[in-house]
Image (cartoon, helix red, strand yellow):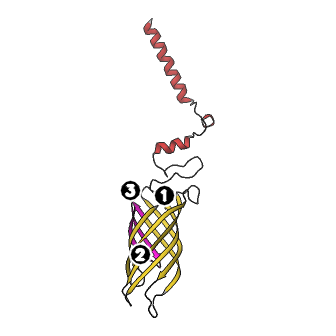
Amino acid sequence: MQATRSKTWAVCGVAILSAAIASPAWADDELPSGFSTANSSATLLGGAGLAQGQNGSFGESPNRFANFRFELHVAFGWYGAVGAGGRFEFPLVRQGLIQGVDDELALSIGAEVFYFYGPYLGLGVTPLLALQWNFYVGPSVSLFPELGLAFIFGPQRERYWGAFVAPYLGFGVRFHFTDRNALLLRASWPAGLQLGITF
Protein backbone atom coordinates (compact mmCIF):
# COMPACT_ATOMS: atom_id res chain seq x y z
CA MET A 1 0.00 0.00 0.00
CA GLN A 2 2.79 2.41 0.89
CA ALA A 3 4.68 1.51 -2.29
CA THR A 4 1.54 2.19 -4.34
CA ARG A 5 1.14 5.65 -2.74
CA SER A 6 4.79 6.49 -3.44
CA LYS A 7 4.39 5.53 -7.10
CA THR A 8 1.22 7.63 -7.33
CA TRP A 9 2.94 10.72 -5.87
CA ALA A 10 5.92 10.21 -8.21
CA VAL A 11 3.66 10.01 -11.28
CA CYS A 12 1.81 13.17 -10.19
CA GLY A 13 5.06 15.01 -9.62
CA VAL A 14 6.38 14.10 -13.08
CA ALA A 15 3.11 15.18 -14.68
CA ILE A 16 3.15 18.57 -12.93
CA LEU A 17 6.79 19.18 -13.85
CA SER A 18 6.14 18.25 -17.50
CA ALA A 19 3.19 20.64 -17.67
CA ALA A 20 5.24 23.46 -16.18
CA ILE A 21 8.02 22.98 -18.74
CA ALA A 22 5.61 22.68 -21.68
CA SER A 23 3.53 25.73 -20.67
CA PRO A 24 5.62 28.11 -18.54
CA ALA A 25 3.58 30.23 -16.20
CA TRP A 26 6.08 33.08 -16.43
CA ALA A 27 5.01 34.47 -19.79
CA ASP A 28 6.18 38.02 -20.54
CA ASP A 29 2.70 39.45 -20.00
CA GLU A 30 2.49 37.81 -16.56
CA LEU A 31 5.90 38.84 -15.24
CA PRO A 32 6.06 40.90 -12.05
CA SER A 33 6.62 44.62 -12.46
CA GLY A 34 10.27 45.53 -13.14
CA PHE A 35 11.24 42.05 -14.41
CA SER A 36 11.86 41.13 -18.04
CA THR A 37 13.28 38.18 -19.91
CA ALA A 38 15.61 40.57 -21.76
CA ASN A 39 17.17 41.71 -18.51
CA SER A 40 17.48 38.16 -17.23
CA SER A 41 19.18 37.12 -20.49
CA ALA A 42 21.69 39.92 -20.14
CA THR A 43 22.40 38.80 -16.59
CA LEU A 44 22.91 35.20 -17.67
CA LEU A 45 25.29 36.26 -20.43
CA GLY A 46 27.30 37.99 -17.72
CA GLY A 47 28.61 40.82 -19.86
CA ALA A 48 27.49 44.41 -20.12
CA GLY A 49 27.35 45.42 -23.76
CA LEU A 50 26.78 41.79 -24.87
CA ALA A 51 22.97 41.77 -24.68
CA GLN A 52 20.30 44.35 -25.31
CA GLY A 53 18.19 45.62 -22.45
CA GLN A 54 14.45 46.24 -22.40
CA ASN A 55 14.74 49.65 -24.08
CA GLY A 56 16.89 48.31 -26.95
CA SER A 57 20.11 49.98 -25.80
CA PHE A 58 23.19 48.05 -24.83
CA GLY A 59 24.36 47.78 -21.25
CA GLU A 60 27.44 49.61 -20.07
CA SER A 61 30.80 48.20 -21.09
CA PRO A 62 32.90 46.98 -18.16
CA ASN A 63 35.66 49.32 -19.38
CA ARG A 64 33.74 52.59 -19.01
CA PHE A 65 35.16 54.99 -16.47
CA ALA A 66 32.82 55.54 -13.55
CA ASN A 67 33.49 59.21 -12.74
CA PHE A 68 36.74 60.40 -14.31
CA ARG A 69 40.10 59.14 -15.53
CA PHE A 70 43.62 60.41 -16.05
CA GLU A 71 45.91 59.87 -18.98
CA LEU A 72 49.68 60.30 -19.37
CA HIS A 73 51.48 60.01 -22.69
CA VAL A 74 54.58 60.81 -24.70
CA ALA A 75 54.05 62.95 -27.79
CA PHE A 76 55.72 63.41 -31.15
CA GLY A 77 54.72 66.70 -32.77
CA TRP A 78 54.30 67.36 -36.47
CA TYR A 79 56.72 70.28 -36.51
CA GLY A 80 59.97 68.75 -35.28
CA ALA A 81 59.05 68.35 -31.60
CA VAL A 82 59.00 65.74 -28.84
CA GLY A 83 57.36 66.01 -25.46
CA ALA A 84 54.83 64.66 -22.99
CA GLY A 85 51.29 65.44 -21.96
CA GLY A 86 48.33 64.51 -19.86
CA ARG A 87 44.54 64.54 -19.89
CA PHE A 88 41.75 64.70 -17.35
CA GLU A 89 38.52 63.20 -18.70
CA PHE A 90 35.00 62.77 -17.37
CA PRO A 91 31.72 61.66 -18.99
CA LEU A 92 29.08 64.13 -20.14
CA VAL A 93 26.55 61.66 -21.60
CA ARG A 94 27.03 58.26 -19.95
CA GLN A 95 24.51 56.36 -22.08
CA GLY A 96 25.80 57.79 -25.35
CA LEU A 97 24.03 59.46 -28.24
CA ILE A 98 22.94 56.49 -30.38
CA GLN A 99 20.40 53.97 -29.16
CA GLY A 100 21.59 50.39 -29.50
CA VAL A 101 25.28 51.42 -29.68
CA ASP A 102 27.66 51.15 -26.72
CA ASP A 103 28.96 54.73 -26.84
CA GLU A 104 29.70 57.57 -24.45
CA LEU A 105 30.38 61.31 -24.78
CA ALA A 106 33.13 62.77 -22.58
CA LEU A 107 35.00 66.02 -22.02
CA SER A 108 38.80 65.84 -22.29
CA ILE A 109 41.00 68.61 -20.85
CA GLY A 110 44.78 68.51 -21.03
CA ALA A 111 48.04 69.95 -22.27
CA GLU A 112 51.21 69.03 -24.17
CA VAL A 113 54.71 70.28 -23.35
CA PHE A 114 56.99 70.14 -26.41
CA TYR A 115 60.66 70.68 -27.04
CA PHE A 116 61.13 71.92 -30.59
CA TYR A 117 64.43 70.82 -32.10
CA GLY A 118 64.20 72.08 -35.65
CA PRO A 119 64.59 74.40 -37.36
CA TYR A 120 64.71 76.41 -34.10
CA LEU A 121 65.18 75.29 -30.52
CA GLY A 122 62.69 76.09 -27.78
CA LEU A 123 59.89 74.95 -25.48
CA GLY A 124 56.21 75.11 -26.30
CA VAL A 125 52.98 74.40 -24.46
CA THR A 126 49.67 73.35 -26.00
CA PRO A 127 46.65 73.35 -23.66
CA LEU A 128 43.56 71.85 -25.27
CA LEU A 129 39.88 71.21 -24.72
CA ALA A 130 38.00 68.55 -26.68
CA LEU A 131 34.79 66.56 -26.86
CA GLN A 132 35.57 62.84 -26.99
CA TRP A 133 33.11 60.31 -28.38
CA ASN A 134 33.95 56.80 -27.13
CA PHE A 135 32.74 53.63 -28.88
CA TYR A 136 33.20 50.33 -27.02
CA VAL A 137 33.55 47.74 -29.77
CA GLY A 138 34.52 44.73 -27.68
CA PRO A 139 35.51 43.54 -24.22
CA SER A 140 38.96 45.16 -24.49
CA VAL A 141 38.90 47.78 -27.28
CA SER A 142 37.41 51.25 -27.60
CA LEU A 143 37.71 53.85 -30.37
CA PHE A 144 37.19 57.59 -30.15
CA PRO A 145 37.18 60.69 -32.36
CA GLU A 146 37.85 64.08 -30.71
CA LEU A 147 37.03 67.64 -31.71
CA GLY A 148 37.94 70.85 -29.89
CA LEU A 149 40.37 73.76 -29.56
CA ALA A 150 44.13 73.88 -28.98
CA PHE A 151 45.85 76.93 -27.49
CA ILE A 152 49.41 76.98 -28.78
CA PHE A 153 52.26 78.84 -27.07
CA GLY A 154 55.50 78.18 -28.93
CA PRO A 155 58.93 79.75 -29.31
CA GLN A 156 58.71 83.36 -30.43
CA ARG A 157 60.75 83.11 -33.62
CA GLU A 158 60.43 84.80 -36.99
CA ARG A 159 58.55 82.57 -39.45
CA TYR A 160 57.98 80.00 -36.73
CA TRP A 161 55.58 79.32 -33.90
CA GLY A 162 53.93 82.09 -31.95
CA ALA A 163 50.86 82.10 -29.70
CA PHE A 164 47.57 81.31 -31.41
CA VAL A 165 44.39 79.24 -31.23
CA ALA A 166 43.78 76.35 -33.64
CA PRO A 167 41.05 73.78 -34.15
CA TYR A 168 41.91 70.42 -32.62
CA LEU A 169 41.05 67.11 -34.30
CA GLY A 170 42.06 63.66 -33.07
CA PHE A 171 41.36 59.97 -33.36
CA GLY A 172 42.51 57.24 -30.99
CA VAL A 173 42.16 53.66 -29.81
CA ARG A 174 42.45 52.15 -26.34
CA PHE A 175 43.39 48.56 -25.54
CA HIS A 176 41.92 47.90 -22.08
CA PHE A 177 43.76 45.43 -19.87
CA THR A 178 41.83 46.21 -16.65
CA ASP A 179 38.53 47.99 -15.98
CA ARG A 180 40.47 51.24 -15.55
CA ASN A 181 43.86 50.92 -17.28
CA ALA A 182 44.38 50.93 -21.03
CA LEU A 183 47.14 51.39 -23.58
CA LEU A 184 46.42 54.48 -25.66
CA LEU A 185 47.35 55.34 -29.26
CA ARG A 186 46.25 58.70 -30.70
CA ALA A 187 46.87 60.73 -33.86
CA SER A 188 45.84 64.38 -33.71
CA TRP A 189 46.42 67.85 -35.09
CA PRO A 190 48.17 69.97 -34.00
CA ALA A 191 49.33 67.86 -31.03
CA GLY A 192 50.83 65.04 -33.12
CA LEU A 193 51.17 61.34 -32.34
CA GLN A 194 50.77 60.09 -28.77
CA LEU A 195 51.42 56.85 -26.91
CA GLY A 196 50.29 56.56 -23.30
CA ILE A 197 48.28 54.87 -20.58
CA THR A 198 45.06 55.65 -18.72
CA PHE A 199 44.53 55.15 -15.01
Amino acid at dot 1 = Asn
Does the segment drawn in magenta span residue 48?
no
Name the image quarter holding residue 31.
top right
Q: Residue at x 47, y 76 (%)?
A: 127
Q: Within 10 angstroms of label 2, few (less than 14), some, or many (20 or more) residues?
A: many
Between 162 and 100, which is closer to the camera in this rendering? 162
Q: In the rendered image, which residue does mark 3 sit on?
A: 178
Q: In the rendered image, which residue does mark 2 sit on?
A: 193
Range drawn in magenta: 174-199
Between 91 and 5, which is closer to the camera in this rendering? 91
Q: In the rendered image, which residue does mark 1 sit on?
A: 67
Q: CA distance from mark 1 to mark 3?
A: 16 Å
Furthest toward the top, the residue is 1
Furthest toward the bottom, the residue is 158
Q: Which element type, helix, strand or loop, lies under badge 1? A: loop
Q: CA distance from mark 2 to mark 1?
A: 26 Å
Please, what is the dominant secondary structure of the magenta stretch? strand
- In the picture, measured across the screen, residue 165 lies left or right of residue 85, that is right
Residue 90 versus residue 82 in the image, above or below: above
Q: Residue at x 52, y 41 (%)?
A: 40
Q: Residue at x 43, y 76 (%)?
A: 112
N-terminal label among 1 and 3: 1
| Label 2 close to label 3 by CB (< 8 Å) | no
Q: Residue at x 43, y 71 (%)?
A: 186
Residue 153 versus residue 183 in the image, above or below: below
Q: Within 10 angstroms of label 3, few (less than 14), some, or many (20 or more) residues?
A: few
